[in-house]
Image (cartoon, helix red, strand yellow):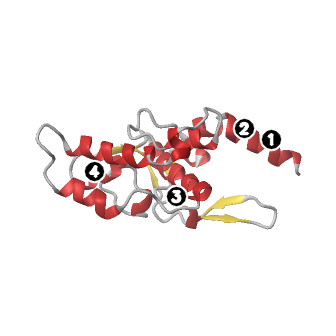
């Protein structure tokens, strides 16, 4: 993903099903059917291809006319965070499509916006995962938490995530076994 982003290309369908591992244990990203290119890194949030289970909050909002443009790298970062969460926890995504659609289709409570209701939903779901709630800064859970920040401006990029201590340690560990 980091390489794609450096070339202004965004996968938009990053998920565990689109990762394959070869006989040496190397991981490869496949299925580039949803990939788009954008020089300014902005993509239309209305581009609704890909797996909804990995949609970032801003992609959901764009599909319900609450926003239009999304930051391509941050959309992929969210999806990477979801994939790592599923892989580490062994559980499917905690965010349910029907819950999100209900939030975005129903009028927001008085004094609230749909965006604020959606933010509360995502943040409560993440906070309900004990390992994320109590994560240490150098843990995989801190990486997941950073990749799943509701605000794309506060969300880790893929490049930032792979510089975190957990990834650096895992990469060093992998090279020692070669």
Disc on res. 62: 4
Tell me where residue 164 appears, x and y as whole percent: 64, 35
Q: How far apart are marks 4 and 3 (CA)?
A: 19 Å
Return the residue found at the far left.
110
Q: Which residue is drawn at 26% across and 60% down?
A: 101
Query: As rendered, which of 42 and 121 lies closer to the eye?
Result: 121
The kind of secondary structure element at disc 2 is helix
Tell me where residue 157 appears, x and y as whole percent: 52, 38
Q: Do the residues labelled 3 and 1 touch (CB within 8 Å)?
A: no
Q: Nearer the viewer, mark 4 or mark 2?
A: 2
Tell me where residue 162 appears, x and y as whole percent: 64, 40
Q: Nearer the viewer, mark 4 or mark 1?
A: 1
Question: Which residue bears the numbered disc 1?
Answer: 172
First-in-chain label (4 vs 1): 4
In this rendering, would 176 be left or right of 144?
A: right
Question: Which residue bears the numbered disc 2?
Answer: 168
Q: How far apart are marks 3 and 1 (CA)?
A: 24 Å
């Amino acid at each position: 993903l980091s390489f794609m982003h450096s070339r202004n290309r965004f996968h938009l369908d990053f998920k565990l099903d689109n990762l394959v591992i070869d006989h040496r244990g190397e991981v490869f990203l496949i299925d580039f059917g949803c990939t788009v290119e954008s020089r300014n890194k902005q993509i239309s949030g209305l581009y609704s291809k890909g797996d909804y289970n990995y949609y970032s909050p801003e992609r959901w909002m764009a599909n319900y006319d609450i926003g239009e443009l999304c930051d391509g790298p941050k959309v992929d970062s969210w999806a990477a965070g979801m994939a790592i969460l599923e892989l580490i926890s062994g559980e499917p995504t905690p965010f349910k499509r029907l819950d999100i659609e209900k939030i975005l289709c129903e009028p927001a409570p008085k004094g609230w916006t749909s965006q604020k209701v959606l933010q509360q939903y995502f943040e409560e779901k993440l906070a309900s995962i004990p390992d994320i709630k109590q994560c240490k800064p150098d843990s995989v859970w801190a990486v997941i938490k950073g990749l799943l920040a509701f605000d794309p401006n506060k969300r880790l990029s893929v490049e930032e995530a792979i510089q975190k201590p957990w990834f650096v340690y895992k990469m060093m560990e992998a090279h020692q076994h070669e």
